[in-house]
Amino acid sequence: MAAIRLQPEDSDAGHARALTAADLISDDDRSVAADSWSIKSDYGSTLDDDQRHADAADALSAVTFRAASDYSSDKEEPDAEAVTSMLGFQSYWDATYADELANFREHGHAGEVWFGADVMETIASWTKSLCTDNSQGHLVNQVLDSKAGTVEQSDKDLSSWSVLDIGTGNGLLLQELAKQGFCDLTGTDYSEGAIDLARNLSDRDGFTNIKFLVDDILDTKLERKYKLVVDKGTLDAIGLHPDGPIKRIMYWNSVSRLVAPGGILVITSCNSTKDELVQEVDNLNQRRDGASQEAGTLVDQEAGRNPPSFCYLDHVRSYPTFMFGGSVGSRVATVAFLTN
Ligand SMILES: C[S@@+](CC[C@H](N)C(=O)[O-])C[C@H]1O[C@@H](n2cnc3c(N)ncnc32)[C@H](O)[C@@H]1O
């Protein structure tokens, strides 16, 4: 792979970019990076794919172009063990979506389905059950009964759910959620190319009611709150930046302001397990509690000025599992959190 000396400051979303993405990243580099970042398409469809996914963590180190220990910045030092990759940079995504847009215009291709079509469909149908159950007042943390209620009732329940997909990419997950009956749908991404592609695809496929906006989740301009917020692979990408640990904290702070009280956040990740995501949320809640006790902001909490906390609600249990070092795990985790 060609050596890439990309300074994070040059490529980061908040900085002027003197170099274009195409100057920095070759097609080969991009495809190695994407292939090796755990999972792209056809999740679990063949043994070869399974093997590819199993090797993903090892392969990822091959695309790490700047060791975390090399990195110096005026921000907090990144975790020494953090894995970084081109996928943590906006320049990577801008270049990727420029290619995907060209491919769409030339051949009508929709682009990558991250984690594969099966996972995407599972997320959409599972999320629908979660939301209809929630609307019907069923208890949380229980096995969901998808047969509860009539189809008409569940469609009615879903119409009240505003949905935000963070880092929507080509927007296909929103199309899948629209097929399940959600109708108030918004997708955001910091890459203009992604939003352009998502708009083109949703127009072509007849989902003209889906709204798409350019927005950086770490510096969001969104003012509205959403009853359902979904993320498929975006927190993973954010965590791959050399400042990943800090950016992940910024992510949680931002997302917790976007989910309406009583709303649901559904995160799909291939870099964190369900337990790691739950732990990350517990850490967020503890930081919050500590900060509000210190500042004596219980009054703020009561007045609803502080962002709500998340608590674990459920996770997808149907993904294929594998055994490694005596432990059973799955390559993708989809976890739902409820806000208080
Ligand atoms: C792995 S892709 C997943 C795309 C889409 N969610 C899907 O499943 O197909 C990660 C996406 O996150 C977007 N992204 C990364 N960091 C972001 C940020 N700070 N704000 C908004 N979008 C971001 C990228 O542009 C990219 O579209």
Image (cartoon, grey):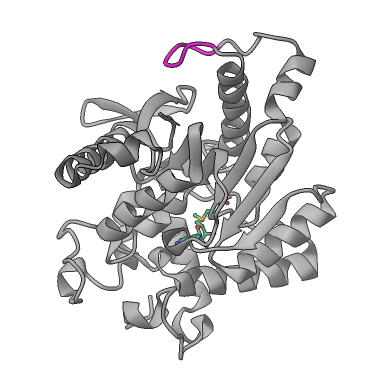
Q: Position of residue 268 (x, y in %)?
A: 46, 40
Total number of numbered discs in the rendering:
0
The correct choice, above or below, for 248 with respect to 75 in the image is above
Considering the whole magenta stretch, tell me its main secondary structure.
Answer: loop
In front of the other: 319 or 97:
97
- Relative to residue 196, is residue 96 drawn left or right? left
Quick check: is 141 in the magenta stretch? yes
Q: Say if 133 sits above or below 227 in the image.
A: above
Tell me the quadrant of the picture where the N terminus can be found: bottom left
Task: Write the residue at 17% across / 74% down.
Answer: 70
Would you identify the image quadrant in which residue 240 lies?
bottom left
* Residue 47 in view: no
In the image, is 192 to the left or to the right of 314?
right
Residue depicted at 65% across the width and 66% down the height: 100
291 with respect to 337 (left or right): left
What is the quadrant of residue 188 in the picture?
Answer: bottom right
Question: Quarter-wise, where is residue 69 in the image?
Answer: bottom left
Name the side, left or right, on which 198 lies relative to 57. Answer: right
Residue shown at the point (20%, 76%) measured from the top left: 73
Give the residues drawn in magenta, as a range.
Answer: 138-144
Residue 297 magenta-drawn?
no
